[in-house]
Amino acid sequence: TSNIVPCAPSNNMFLLLSTISCSILKVSFTMGKIFAESFRNFSISGIKSALSESDNSPVFTAIVCTYNRPAMLKEAVAAIRRQTYKNLEIILINNGTDSESIDYLEEVAGIDKRVKLVHFKDNVYSPDDPGKYIDICFNAALEIATGDYIWCQSDDDFIGDDYAERMIALFLDNPECTTAAGFAVSIDGEGKPNGIAHDHPNVRPRYMPGHE
């Protein structure tokens, strides 16, 4: 089908991130490279209308990479499909995963036209280079992404139902902002918060000016 893209590792793919981090990028694509730019198509006074379901609203692309965790994958994808913000593009990456996960990917792509699939026959991972799959898998997804905002996550990450709506509003309200992320909450196997704190040096103010 037209929304399934078979992929193989390529030395020509451009680097997305040096480490996997759950953050949203405001992006444009030129000559196979990714860069951030000010989003000028919407005025701050028009945020509410921009967030409505219309042909002019920004596209929010969610990219999920999965490998042999079908139960978590289903929860992760369900959370994305439940978003209150409806102008979504969902790209699901089969990183050489098991048949149960592949069957689910095919199923959800068949019932939701917003879903695109990227298939890798073999798992892209190397113990000598743990970040290899990020470069290869996520960049393969970026090559077919059309979103104004890009969200990357693993199959064990779940986002709140209004996450996309809140994050797009933040970007539109702060035109100079190029990356942002929500605060992470650790959960147990049943999806309940387990009280584990995430104290780390990457917690920043709601908005901070960009840098050259």
Image (cartoon, rainbow, N blue to C red):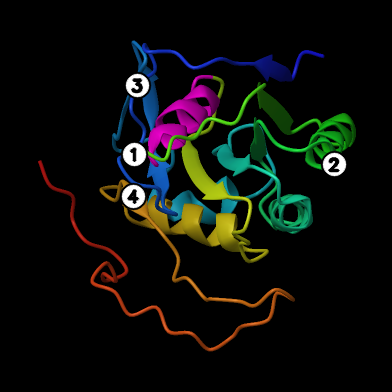
Task: List the single residue furthest toward the left.
Answer: 212
Per the image, is 171 magenta? no
Q: What element does badge 1 sit on?
A: loop
Residue 8 vs 128, above or below: the answer is above
Local crowd size for mark 1, using a 10 Å CA cut-off: few (<14), some (14–19), many (≥20): few
Q: Amino acid at mark 4?
A: Thr
Choose between 159 and 149: the one closer to the eye. 159
Residue at 43% from the left image edge and 84% from the top image edge: 197
Q: Determine which residue is flagged by label 4.
A: 179
Say left or right for 38 vs 115: left
Q: Amino acid at mark 1?
A: Leu
Q: Amino acid at mark 3?
A: Phe
Is there a contact, CB below 8 Å, between mark 3 and mark 1?
no
Tell me the distance, in whole angstroms, between the alpha carbons under discs 1 and 4.
Answer: 12 Å
Residue at 65% from the left image edge and 49% from the top image edge: 52
Say left or right for 170 vs 7: left
Choose between 196 and 146: the one closer to the eye. 196
Q: Position of residue 199 (x, y in %)?
A: 33, 80
Q: Earlier in the sequence, mark 4 or mark 3?
A: 3
Tell me the distance, in whole angstroms, between the alpha carbons under discs 2 and 4.
Answer: 34 Å
Name the magenta segment's main secondary structure: helix
Q: What quarter of the picture does the C terminus occupy? A: top left
Residue 56 vs 48, above or below: the answer is above
Q: Determine which residue is flagged by label 3.
A: 14
Highlighted magenta segment, given as a residue range: 129-143
Q: Earlier in the sequence, mark 2 or mark 4?
A: 2
Tell me the distance, in whole angstroms, between the alpha carbons under discs 1 and 2.
Answer: 29 Å
Q: Determine which residue is flagged by label 1.
A: 17
Q: Earlier in the sequence, mark 1 or mark 2?
A: 1
